[in-house]
Image (cartoon, grey):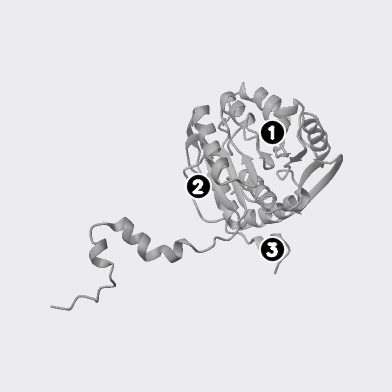
Amino acid sequence: MPEKPASDGLDSACAHRLSPCTHARYAAVMTVARRPLARALTIAGSDPSGGAGLQADLKTFHQHGVYGAAAVTLVTVQNTVGVTRVEPLQPDLVRAQVDAVLFDVEPSAVKTGALGSAAVIEAVAAIAFAAPLVVDPVMISKHGHSLMAPEARAVLVAKLVPVAALVTPNAHEAAAITGAPVETLADAESAAKAIAALGARAVLVKMGHLAGPEAIDVLFHAGRVRHFAAPHVASRHVHGSGCSYSAAITAGLARGLPLEDAIANAKAWMSLAIATPPAVGGGIGPVDHFASTSIASGGA
C-alpha cells in the first residue's frame, strides 16, 4: 500500500473538526489586507433570462470595476420572447434587504429599477441614502408588459423623484411622469426641466430610439441642457439596454466620477454594447455586457 503523506501536525486534530482546521491552515490568507473597491447597490426586479433587471445591473457594475449588491423588488417570469408573470415582493422585505446592504456594504451609489408597487416605492423613498440615488423609472418591459401598477406612478412622482440625484426616463416614461408627449429632442428638453422641477437634481431623458445618424440623450443639470450623442446603431437586440445604461452611470458615480463624465462614459459603452449583441435567445436579445469599458472611457 502507498505510504500516507507526512502529517503537518494538524491532520489528527482536524480529522473530525473541519472548521478549526480551516482556520488554522488559512489564517494567513484571512488576515491579508483587503483592497478598497467602489460599491453600488441596485434595487430592482429580477429577470431570470439575465438580460435586464438586477442581473443586467450587476453585470454592468462588474464590467465597470464596481462591486455590485442587489435588493430584489419583484420577480418576473420572462425571457427574450416575452414576460408572462410579475410578482412584486412585500415592501418590508424589500426594505430589509436594502437596510442589510446599507449597514454592511455601504454602497457609494444606489440605483432603482422596476419597483412594481406604490408600497415598495414608498418604502424605498423613505430611506435616507447617504450615496447618490439614480432613479430609473421602469414602467414597462421591452415587450410591452407593465412592470409598475398605474397607481404607483403618482407615488413615484411625489416621493421618489424628489430625492433622486438623477432620474433616467426614456421617452415613454418621461411622458408618463410629465403628462406631455415626448417625441422630439425639444420635447425631451422640456420634459427634463419639468421633472427637475419636481425635485430631482438632474434628469437624463433617453431618446436613442429616434431615427437619425446619432442616438441623442438630453440632460438637464445645474440649470443647463446638454446633449449626449453616439452613433445610432440599428439593432433589435436591446433587451436591458435602459437598465444597463443607468447602471453604467451609477457605476461611474460609485467610482467618484462627476455626473456628466459618468454619463459620457456610460453612453459610449452602451453604444458599443448595442453594436455587439451576443447570440442569446430567439426574441429581443440582450446587449453585450462584455463590451469594453476602456474604449468607452477613451482608453486604447
C-alpha separation, residue under disc 2 versus residue under disc 1: 23 Å
- Tell me if mark 1 has few (under 14), some (14-19) or many (20+) residues whose alpha carbon lies within 10 angstroms of its own: some
Crowd around label 3: few <14 · some 14–19 · many ≥20 (10 Å): few
Number of marks in the rendered image: 3
Judging from the image, what secondary structure is the residue with disc 2 in?
loop
The residue mark sitting in front, 3 or 1, is: 3
Drawn side of residue 289 relative to residue 207, left or right:
left
Query: Residue at position x 48%, y 45% from top?
Result: 49
Which one is nearer the viewer's eye here, 279 or 62? 62
> What residue is disc 3 on?
295
Q: Are marks 2 and 1 in contact (CB under 8 Å)?
A: no
- Tell me the kind of residue under disc 1: His
Query: Is 136 situated above or below 89?
Result: below
Q: Earlier in the sequence, mark 2 or mark 1?
A: 2
Mark 3 to mark 1: distance in Å?
Answer: 30 Å
Q: Which residue is mark 1?
A: 172
Q: Quadrant of the C terminus?
A: bottom right
The kind of residue on which mark 3 rests is Ile
Question: Which secondary structure, mark 1?
Answer: helix
Q: Answer with the quarter of the image where residue 9 lies.
A: bottom left
Specify whether 2 is left or right of 195.
Answer: left
Q: Residue at x 61, y 46 (%)?
A: 107
Counting other residues with Cα less than 10 Å from the Cα at mark 2, is it few (<14), some (14-19), or many (20 or more)?
Answer: many
Which percent across, then down, holds residue 105?
56, 47
Per the image, the residue denoted by label 2 is 50
